[in-house]
Image (cartoon, rainbow, N blue to C red):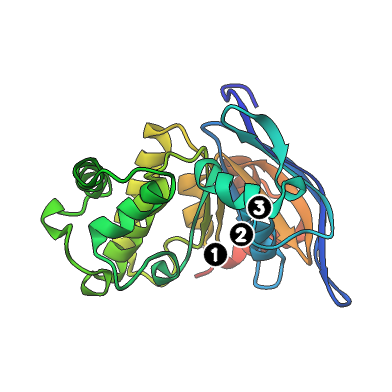
Amino acid sequence: MTGFAEQILKVEGLSKTFGRMAACRNISFSLHRGEVLGIVGESGSGKSTLLKCLAGTLPPDTGTVTVAVPGLGHRDLWRMEEAEREQLLPSILSLIHQNPRDGLRLDVSAGGNISEPLMTSGNRHYGSLRTVALEWLRNVEIDPIRVDDLPQTFSGGMQQRLQIARGLVTHPQLVLMDEPTGGLDVSVQAKLLDLLRRLVREFNLAAVIVTHDLGVARLLSDRLMVMQSGRVIETGLTDRVLEDPRQAYTQLLVSSVLQV
């Protein structure tokens, strides 16, 4: 696509099986800075497995996941030594979980949750850590007065905002989102989507969003990838795929939303 600069992610021939079940089959795509890719499909289509392979938490059986590493060029995530991968991942990518509690330390304050990734990378200055934490609370539209509150005192939508702040504080180039608005009330979803769209543009992020909600995909993604039974069956600009789906399965997905 024109309009997008540096290539941040390139996936080639990625496959993953569990026993006889092929969760991902020979998947290839690329993603550039400032671009958002939506991955949609019903439960069991393989989209969550793919996301785990991209996030460095589940090794693929075959294929490569090449990421842009600041100062080191492009590296295959799964050819790094485990220690190197763990060290570099915070500067490369962030994973936003559907359940924010999976991405937060519930026994640590809001400010502590935001500061922890910076401390892991070597920042130990309390004053600067707190300043950054306050700044990121504002970035995700949480009142900074809550910097010392524990996450369990936040609503579900506020917990998700806090998880986003924790994930973006290290300024990763790539953000992976797993149903980031799932389980939230419609009004809360709308505000969170507005926030995500603003942050992606403001920080010029490359992002992958896995969702079953085509409305979310339309609002956030530039391109759409439709998965069925572990395969990518259709891909293209989001509006084109949703307004003129070529595959019968995609047509069924779109029509089922229109009928609700």
Residue beneath disc 1: 257
Number of numbered discs overlaid on the protein picture:
3
Q: Residue at x 45, y 32 (%)?
A: 204
Q: Give the number of the disc on residue 254.
A: 2
Residue 181 vertical position relative to residue 31 in the rendered view, above or below: below
Q: Residue at x 67, y 50 (%)?
A: 225
Q: Are marks 1 and 2 in contact (CB under 8 Å)?
A: yes
Residue 26 vertical position relative to residue 229 in the rendered view, above or below: above
Residue 11, visible in the rendered structure: yes
Q: Amino acid at mark 2?
A: Val
Residue 78 vertical position relative to residue 249 in the rendered view, above or below: above
User: In the picture, residue 210 is in which quadrant?
Assistant: bottom right
Given residues 91 and 103, the one toward you in this image is 91
Q: Give percent across and percent down for residue 126.
A: 22, 47
User: In the picture, residue 162 is in which quadrant?
Assistant: bottom left
The reply, left or right, for residue 125 in relation to residue 18 is left
Q: Secondary structure at mark 2?
A: helix
Which is in the foreground here, disc 3 or disc 1?
3
Q: Amino acid at mark 3?
A: Leu
> CA gap, disc 1 to disc 2?
5 Å
Which is in the foreground here, disc 2 or disc 3?
3
Crowding near the residue tagged with mark 1, few <14, some 14–19, many ≥20 C-alpha atoms within 10 Å:
few
Crowding near the residue tagged with mark 3, few <14, some 14–19, many ≥20 C-alpha atoms within 10 Å:
many
Crowding near the residue tagged with mark 2, few <14, some 14–19, many ≥20 C-alpha atoms within 10 Å:
some
* Mark earlier in primary sequence (3, 1): 3
Q: Amino acid at mark 1?
A: Val
> CA gap, disc 2 to disc 3?
26 Å
Q: Give the number of the disc on residue 54.
A: 3
